[in-house]
Image (cartoon, rainbow, N blue to C red):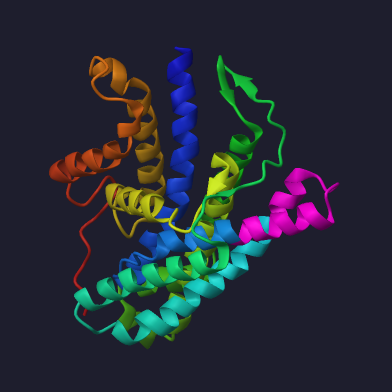
Amino acid sequence: MDTLIQQIINGLVLGSMYALVALGYTMVYGVLNLINFAHGDVLMIGAMTGLTILNLLNQYAPEMPGYIKLAIAIGGAIPVCMIVNVLIERVAYRRLRNAPRLAPLITAIGVSILLQTIAMMIWTRNPLPFPQLLSPEPVMIAGALISQTQILLLVLAATSMVGLVLLVEKTKMGRAMRATAENPRVAGLMGVDSNKVIMLTFALGAALAAVAGVMWGANYASIQFAMGLLPGLKAFCAAVLGGIGNIYGAMIGGIVLGLVESLGAGYIGDLTGGFLGSHYQDIFAFVVLILVLTVRPSGIMGERVADRA
């Protein structure tokens, strides 16, 4: 039972990070019908920026409490990622809105490689240690252990997701985002500035990726220039699993994917008689995606999208 609870906690932590990144995929797809495959690298930029800020704080303000340092690192990573993502939209995607769908896909892959190359030039290709700023003393919950970093990650993820839902559901800009996602042409006739909405969508997705990136580094204690590839791909799977274009689906898909991956890693050895080890955990995300889409192609919460005029 303790092992089960431990794996559930690990799955919630992992799933929370997937959910934050998946929200970026699903929001952009919702308003632009575009898959931004460079989004995982925005997470990487957030982690690298956070590391740079933390190294400066450790050098010039070593007595500052760790949670304040993390808050400053996240606060600094968010605007950097927002600027990067808005520039990606403005330079790489805006001219391709009416192009064949293959064109923005190829462009996204090129942007991803470009971001990785720039990161490698700035931060080197070697794995970089991420400072551990919070107490290593874990907290016991129902026989399972959870670190203070993981508790902070869960709180930040939940707060970010609630904040996003409130923004989308309760604000004027949120209504504009929903109107643009439903029918951009009609939204434009009603006075909605689609360029502004799309720019905000990219910025919001980048902010969530920045939070996930910094906390990913804090949780795993090591980052490197290509770190965004696999989390980004799994977060995309989470978005599709939950129903691409549905923000609630992205949250649920991320959590489900994290739980399945963690539980699979914990029990795959027993289930296969030791034939497979926990290092095969990465296959679970894609196996689950295939199984779910076979039964429900639109995803867990996906709906049939009306054809756009």
Query: Residue at 23% across / 83% down in the picture?
Result: 99
The quarter of the rendered structure image containing the C terminus is bottom left
Region in magenta = 49-72
Pinpoint residue 55: horizontal percent, then vertical percent. Answer: 71, 55
Query: Residue at 33% across / 79% down in the picture?
Result: 184
**Is 257 placed left or right of 2 in the picture?**
left
Q: Nearer the viewer, residue 56 or 107?
A: 56
Pinpoint residue 63: horizontal percent, then vertical percent. Answer: 86, 46
**Is residue 242 shown above or below 287?**
below
Q: Nearer the viewer, residue 281 or 247?
A: 281
**Is residue 190 shown above or below 80?**
below
Q: Nearer the viewer, residue 118 or 309?
A: 118
**Is 288 placed left or right of 159 in the picture?**
left
The quarter of the rendered structure image containing the N terminus is top left
Pinpoint residue 175: horizontal percent, then vertical percent. Answer: 46, 69
**Is residue 115 shown above or below 128?**
below
Query: Residue at 71% across / 38% down in the picture?
Result: 134
**Is residue 191 shown above or below 254?**
below
Indicate whether residue 61 is drawn in magenta: yes
Query: Residue at 57% across / 59% down in the picture?
Result: 48
Residue sticking out furthest to the top? 1
Looking at the image, can residue 101 be seen?
no
**Is 238 placed left or right of 290 in the picture?**
right
